[in-house]
């Protein structure tokens, strides 16, 4: 009997800045100057949630790219929009982009793999992370940040940042990932 393979790491690198962000625009400017393409973005640390969520949002983005139905003009902005669960790009950047006071973030690469025609036919390369590690390392160096040895986990803080929870509210840990996924699914409603 075949064992299910675990979800491969999404090409996302957790980073910690040397000090909390005072001017998000300057960080984004440096990042945009050195990123290889608009398939790279900076994502709020708590917005990532999990490998499943990142791959789910990626799949939604790729379907929109292939059908010409993106709201944003670039894949990085569309990814942020979907992560944020909104149609409004300005709200997406507020919720899921880096903000003043942030001490950490994710550098994300959005693969451009072809989607399969039927359910389950999309081939996700297990090397997506390692194939892009050199580019990510260079971006980390240009930002003067340090790599975090962590993967995304669902948190109440992330749900609050994305507007899915009010400040002070909490959800059981076992339900958080589902709330993140549902919030992303509402982006076009």
Image (cartoon, grey):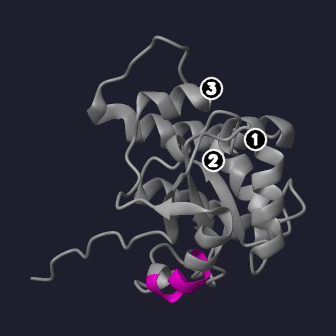
Residue 83 badge: 2
Task: Indicate the secondary structure of the residue bearing disc 1.
Answer: helix
Residue 92 badge: 1
Vertical position of residue 37 compared to residue 107: above or below: below
Q: Earlier in the sequence, mark 3 or mark 2?
A: 2
Looking at the rendering, the stretch of residues picked out in magenta corresponds to: 130-136
Q: Is residue 2 left or right of residue 62?
A: left
Residue 163 badge: 3
* x and y, in percent, of residue 4 in the image: 22, 74
Whole-number angstrom distance, CA of label 3 to CA of label 2 = 11 Å
Task: Indicate the secondary structure of the residue bearing disc 3.
Answer: loop
* x and y, in percent, of residue 146 in the image: 49, 62
For residue 120, what is the image quadrant?
bottom left
* x and y, in percent, of residue 13 in the image: 50, 65
Residue lying at the far top of the rendered structure: 168
Task: Indicate the secondary structure of the residue bearing disc 2.
Answer: helix
Whole-number angstrom distance, CA of label 1 to CA of label 3 = 10 Å
- Residue at the (62%, 26%) spot, across then down: 163
For residue 150, what is the image quadrant?
bottom left
Label 1 with label 3: CB-CB less than 8 Å: no
Neighbor class of circle 3 (other Cα within 10 Å; few <14, some 14-19, many 20+) is some
Vertical position of residue 81 compared to residue 163: above or below: below
Neighbor class of circle 1 (other Cα within 10 Å; few <14, some 14-19, many 20+) is many
Label 1 with label 2: CB-CB less than 8 Å: yes
Q: Does residue 134 belong to the magenta stretch?
A: yes
Q: Which of marks 1 and 3 is nearer the N terminus?
A: 1
- Residue at the (60%, 43%) spot, across then down: 184
* x and y, in percent, of residue 94 in the image: 75, 36
Neighbor class of circle 2 (other Cα within 10 Å; few <14, some 14-19, many 20+) is many
């Amino acid at each position: 009997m075949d064992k299910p393979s675990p979800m491969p790491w999404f090409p996302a690198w957790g980073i910690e800045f040397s000090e909390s962000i005072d001017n998000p625009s300057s960080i984004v400017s440096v990042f945009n100057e050195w990123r290889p393409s608009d398939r790279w973005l900076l994502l709020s640390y708590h917005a990532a949630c999990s490998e499943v969520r990142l791959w789910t949002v990626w799949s939604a983005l790729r379907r929109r790219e292939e059908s010409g139905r993106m709201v944003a003009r670039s894949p990085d902005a569309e990814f942020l929009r979907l992560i944020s669960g909104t149609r409004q790009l300005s709200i997406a950047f507020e919720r899921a982009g880096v903000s003043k006071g942030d001490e950490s973030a994710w550098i994300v690469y959005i693969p451009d793999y072809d989607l399969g025609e039927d359910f389950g036919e999309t081939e996700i390369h297990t090397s997506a992370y390692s194939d892009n590690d050199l580019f990510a390392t260079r971006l980390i160096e240009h930002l003067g940040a340090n790599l975090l040895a962590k993967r995304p986990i669902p948190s109440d803080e992330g749900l609050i940042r994305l507007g899915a929870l009010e400040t002070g509210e909490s959800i059981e840990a076992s339900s958080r990932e589902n709330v993140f996924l549902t919030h992303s699914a509402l982006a076009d409603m």
